[in-house]
Image: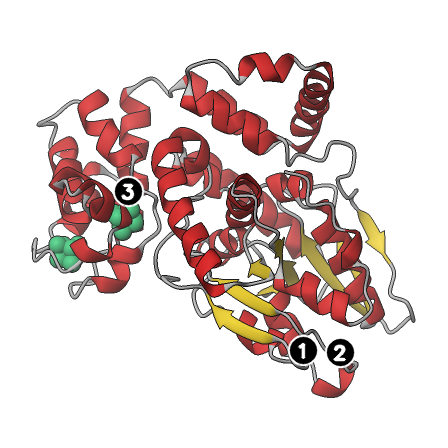
Amino acid sequence: MTPEQLLSEADRCVKCGFCLPECPTYRILANEADSPRGRISLMQALAKGEIDPGARLEIHLDRCLACRACESACPSGVNYATLLSASRALITQRKQGRPLLHGSLALLVDPKRLDYWGRVFHLFRRTGVLTLANTLPSARLKRLLRLGRQLKPGASVKPGLYPATLPTGKLVRLFTGCVGNQMEPHLIQTSLRLLSRLGFAVEIPEAQRCCGALHRHNGYPDEADGYCEANRRQTGKSRAQTLITLASACHLELHEHRASRIPVTSLTDFLLDLPLKAFPPLKPYTGRVAIHVPCSSQGDRSRELLQRIPLAEIVALADNGVCCGAAGSYMLSQPTLSIALGSAKIEHLKNCQADILVTGNTGCAMQFRQLIAEAGLEIRVMHPVELIARQWGGTSDEVDQTT
Ligand code: SF4
Ligand code: SF4
């Protein structure tokens, strides 16, 4: 998007302020510059060259979660997410590519490097070095160390063709995600087993790339487009009937940027769209299950799926329209705000007395796992599909909830 295109889209904002009460950062900080309307004004000034990218501008744009709650509230239909991505790209351009940020993103989207650093991290943890690092004053470093405990080096699921239990000729492709495969390999393993039992062979290609969301949201649209193109090209060669996603953030990016030549479906939707008779009766569960709906999961159907579990009490977590503060790399870049938003969710969880929290996004699951553990709560965090697999007599019980 050129600065002129950015200005033209931003001009659609009539500054009515309807979006302000929906914006989580405005609700916390009560500052116009941390509201959608204020940020759009800053973006306009940036595109016109009236202000330079610098700490004062970036601080407000960086605090934005990209949760898009403002878009749903906007009567003028302003495409806020596009404006934000374009503005971040302008800042990146004008700041010579921000090499430090670029290097960190490169690490997150490279499974081999992430696995390597996961091993180093665990080694440091065993030797006690991390206890010292934890005393450092940097809130970002502390957050990194706390979240890093969820890394499962060496456990990631390898690319390959995973056969169905019975040969049926049905083939699907699984999008594993880069961080997801390091943080939630148990979810991928459970999904493989579930699909196999339903008669689907599953392919995970070696050439699968990141969905591009992290780069797009941080001001590197060309790289994000490159990832989309790579995924588009390799799905074009596949015989699979659909590309199945597990994390809603990856799903949204693949879907919005048409990064697949075969249809993209979340595993939740895929299971719901199978004929009912393909599904075995599920074992009853007598606990309470709270559903967290990620910002990236528009039209979330987890409740519909989980209602198939006899006796389970399914409740929506209060304030589901408000971001949990995970928001991709936001957890690391804005630890204070991220934890403030996450802690509000923990209070809702305590109030609803849930036994299990389900969420369909890796980042949200990481946020909840850390904050639940630190609050001393015994609430398990699962993907809706993991709970279904468990009640089918699947093997989700072996899930390691390391935090
Ligand atoms: S995307 Fe979310 S945090 Fe950012 S301005 Fe909109 S509502 Fe606020
Ligand atoms: S609701 Fe839409 S038009 Fe109104 S201030 Fe917010 S972004 Fe602008």
In space, the residues marked 1 and 3 are separated at their CA atoms by 41 Å
The residue carrying mark 2 is: 282
In space, the residues marked 2 and 1 are separated at their CA atoms by 6 Å
Q: Is mark 3 within 8 Å of ligand 1?
A: yes
Type of the residue with mark 3 = Leu
- In this rendered view, identify the residue nearer to me: 380 or 96: 380
The residue carrying mark 1 is: 309
The residue carrying mark 3 is: 84
Q: Please tell me in which quarter of the rendered image ligand 2 is found.
A: bottom left
Res 12 visible: no
Secondary structure type for disc 3: helix
| Marks 2,1: beta carbons within 8 A | yes
Secondary structure type for disc 2: loop
Please name the residue shown 62% across and 64% down the image: 384
Taking the image as shown, residue 251 lies to the left or right of residue 209, namely left
Question: Sequence-wise, which precedes: disc 2 or disc 3?
Answer: 3
